[in-house]
Amino acid sequence: MKAIVHSKEKGIAGLNYQEVPEKKPGYGEVKVKLKAVGLNRRDLFVINNRTSEDPVFIPGSDGTGIIEEIGEGISDFTIHTEVIINPSLDWEFANEVPTVPKILGGPSDGTFSEYVIISSKNVVKKPSYLSWEEAGVLSLSALTAYRALFTKGNLKKDQHLLIPGIGSGVATYAMLFAKAIGAKVSVTSRREEKRQQARNHGADRAFDNNTDWNESLEGEKVDVVLDSVGPATFPHYFDVLRPNGCIVNFGASSGDKVEIPLRTLFYPQFNILGTSMGSREEFEQMIEFITKHSLNPIIDKTYSLPEAILAFNRMNEGEQFGNIALLIE
């Protein structure tokens, strides 16, 4: 079968489209003929942190396709079932948090190939209203956004969510999810094009990171901040959060270290929570949620599997708004 593999050279330079051996599903596993897969910033992180001594592997966490073979011991799926892959491995329930989440596509082989073999516990039936591209980009970003907003941030109708740095898959899903429950959403971006796209998809406010945030919010406070930026924007949050407000962090695109004046934390009783990925329980809840609200993922751009390097370059340059898909013939 054909696949995108990473070997020797660090980063995007180590990616190649080539033939790799096919495998058979084992006990409890299914073999899925992939129709579309999605890129995530995690894919960049994984290939940028590999060394020339690491074994060749297939990156990719998101994917959707059709079950072509089933291993022994499976009764809940049949051949030809259309499925979406849940890349969160060995995490059953929301409150049983692993030390480090295990994720498909690093170090184990992932989805940037014509086929993938995975436990039947990690596939769910594809909602019929989703296109292949939409289903292919759903899993990792949507699961991360769902847990961050609802399990951790406890976001409710009529509350106010702030998303700094709109444009990524997680950020755009969070915007769609929050609007679906009737929450208010404000976003920031340094690019006017992304701010306008956010408004087009329902954001109530969209402003430049470099403005006065209180002024841009017209003095209105927010209940939840969904942070993936880190130190570049973190100091602003304490100025715009309501007392007892919540910062939910799932990334650190501008660095790992932030400095917090403790009195600005304990007097207004702010909550700072970390999150990463999500459980099988939350994945199933997320699929039910998007189906109930008929939500469609925002597709930034679609490439073919052999064009994966072009797709990686686009993501690396931060140009996308929403998710980038790879279609597989």
Image: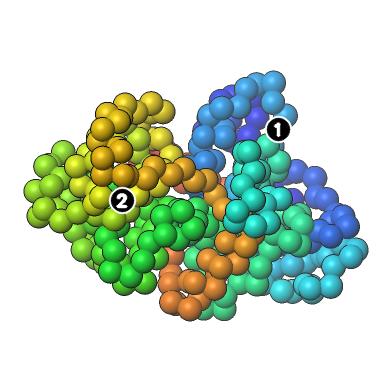
In the displayed structure, 148 sits above or below 309; it is below
Looking at the image, residue 278 sits to the left or right of residue 189; the answer is right
Q: Residue at x 12, y 42 (%)?
A: 211
Query: Element type at marker 2?
Result: strand
Looking at the image, residue 148 sits to the left or right of residue 232; the answer is right
Q: How many marks?
A: 2
Residue 232 in view, yes or no = no
Q: Residue at x 31, y 51 (%)?
A: 245
The image shows residue 236 at horizontal and vertical percentages of 22, 39
Residue with the mark numbered 2: 244
In the displayed structure, 66 sits above or below 111; it is below
Q: Nearer the viewer, residue 125 or 93?
A: 93
Q: Nearer the viewer, mark 2 or mark 1?
A: 2
Q: Earlier in the sequence, mark 2 or mark 1?
A: 1
Picture disc at residue 56: 1
Q: Residue at x 57, y 35 (%)?
A: 46
Q: Nearer the viewer, residue 193 or 42?
A: 42
Dividing the picture into quadrants, the one containing residue 279 is bottom right
